[in-house]
């Protein structure tokens, strides 16, 4: 994962429109997002059956990760956002299942929209701006597995995301129904609420953001406890596979986000479990100790040679240590094992572009075109594609990719100029001409919403 500061102008615009506050714009720009293929796959693996239980198409809901230590999760329209603090502090997958189910219930019931008069009055353009803003922010500039954008505040602390006690109890009851259909023990929901109550007590009145936006009450907890105790899913733990991926996710987050010196001091060198090796590998990498980082990740690959995410991690270590040629080999193996992972394809392409060789550039272009078909809101993919197209002499392709990148990062005037250049140089009705027109229309909508 990389820490890369950048301006989040679309995100700021969208959130400011929704909340009707100029001051909020500055806060929105400080949102901090993470992109990581493995972590996103784990959250998708866990959330998909919950979404289906709620009769919602899994692909209709996007999941994002905010780099914030607080215990929080929230939804905006059909976007579900998790704080890293929640993902690392919830020790069992049953606890995380409970949060996913609860937030899914809020989406299914439309609670966020019910609480937001601003959304009701301008639902279309405002929600579109927020969705594009979150996605553009989360895409970041880090193609090597993940990107972290500097910051730390969250829009979840604002009033439009605060639910009533009645909505909370309703979401609790619906969530248990979803978990019963899996089945997964809903007791994890109670464990999470107990953690929140403990935070309130220890912090002497400074409540965690989740408690602010999801109000706790004795009545709510009592109702939840009674339903949990009578649930048909009591005693059904998460599967061994889910437990495994959940622990890997927590280990990877801790390795990248905790102080590497502390990680290396707390994780016993004799511990050869996968989670311990993941944490040590990442901590060594963040300490600029490539030799030990590779030793640990090579041990992981030896144990699981067909694990795309371990090959991707090895590629990241090498790429960020200025060894792009070696990184290409690791990324190529990762792409072969996970050909449908756009984040890995973008990382592979970046390493290929670093070689600055015609054949490598052509391979990078192929990977980037595949990545943008799967994730067209990944800004680094568009930026890298513009470089590849320019090197290959495809000026219109470079202009179109540049326009995509500029539109998603808020450079609206430049985006429009490049899109019009594409339209003027392309046959009317061609795919490039049509896409350029879409960009021009999106820019015009964004300007109207300022």
Image (tube, rainbow, N blue to C red):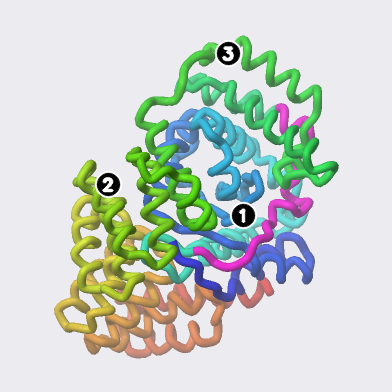
- Residue named by callout 2: 300
Q: Are marks 2 and 1 in contact (CB under 8 Å)?
A: no
Q: Quadrant of residue 106?
A: top right
Give the side of residue 206 with respect to residue 257, left or right. right
Q: Earlier in the sequence, mark 2 or mark 3?
A: 3
Q: Magenta segment range? A: 148-169
Query: Does residue 189 appear in the picture of this structure?
Result: yes
- Residue named by callout 3: 231
Q: Is residue 178 above or below residue 434?
A: above
**Closer mark to the observer between disc 1 and disc 3:** 1
- Point 35% across, 46% down: residue: 277
Residue 157: percent from left, percent from top = 74, 52
Distance, label 2 to label 3, CA atoms, is 39 Å
Q: Nearer the viewer, residue 19 or 426?
A: 19
- Residue named by callout 1: 68
Count the marks: how many? 3
Distance, label 1 to label 3, CA atoms, is 33 Å
């Amino acid at each position: 994962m990389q820490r890369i500061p950048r301006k989040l102008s679309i995100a700021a615009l969208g959130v400011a429109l929704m909340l009707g506050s100029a001051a909020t714009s500055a806060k929105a720009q400080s949102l901090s997002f993470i992109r990581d293929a493995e972590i996103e796959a784990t959250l998708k693996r866990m959330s998909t059956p919950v979404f289906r239980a709620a009769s919602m198409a899994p692909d209709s809901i996007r999941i994002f990760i905010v780099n914030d230590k607080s215990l929080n999760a929230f939804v905006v329209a059909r976007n579900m956002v998790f704080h890293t603090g929640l993902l690392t502090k919830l020790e069992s997958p049953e606890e995380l299942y409970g949060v996913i189910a609860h937030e899914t219930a809020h989406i299914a019931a439309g609670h966020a929209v019910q609480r937001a008069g601003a959304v009701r009055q301008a639902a279309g353009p405002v929600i579109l701006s927020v969705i594009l803003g979150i996605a553009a922010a989360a895409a970041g500039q880090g193609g090597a597995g993940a990107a972290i954008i500097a910051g730390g505040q969250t829009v979840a602390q604002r009033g439009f995301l605060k639910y009533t006690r009645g909505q909370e109890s309703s979401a609790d009851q619906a969530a248990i129904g979803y978990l019963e259909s899996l089945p997964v023990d809903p007791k994890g929901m109670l464990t999470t609420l107990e953690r929140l109550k403990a935070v309130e007590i220890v912090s002497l009145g400074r409540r965690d953001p989740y408690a602010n936006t999801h109000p706790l009450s004795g009545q709510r907890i009592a109702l939840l406890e009674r339903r949990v105790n009578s649930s048909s899913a009591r005693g059904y733990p998460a599967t061994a596979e889910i437990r495994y991926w959940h622990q890997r996710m927590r280990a990877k987050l801790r390795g990248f986000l905790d102080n590497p010196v502390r990680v290396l001091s707390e994780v016993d060198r004799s511990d050869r479990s996968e989670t311990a090796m993941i944490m040590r590998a990442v901590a060594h990498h963040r300490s600029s100790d490539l030799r030990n980082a590779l030793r640990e990740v090579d041990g992981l690959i030896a144990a699981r040679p067909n694990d795309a995410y371990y090959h991707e991690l090895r590629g990241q270590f090498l790429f960020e240590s200025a060894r792009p040629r070696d990184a290409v080999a690791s990324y190529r193996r990762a792409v072969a094992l996970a050909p449908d992972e756009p984040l890995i394809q973008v990382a592979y392409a970046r390493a290929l572009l670093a070689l600055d060789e015609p054949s490598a550039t052509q391979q990078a272009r192929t990977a980037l075109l595949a990545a943008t078909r799967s994730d067209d809101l990944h800004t680094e993919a568009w930026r890298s594609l513009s470089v590849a197209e320019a090197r290959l002499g495809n000026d219109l392709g470079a202009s179109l990719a540049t326009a995509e990148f500029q539109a998603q990062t808020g450079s609206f005037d430049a985006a429009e100029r490049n899109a019009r250049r594409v339209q003027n140089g392309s046959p009317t009705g061609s795919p490039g001409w049509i896409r350029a027109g879409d960009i021009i229309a999106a820019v015009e909508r964004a300007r109207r919403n300022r």
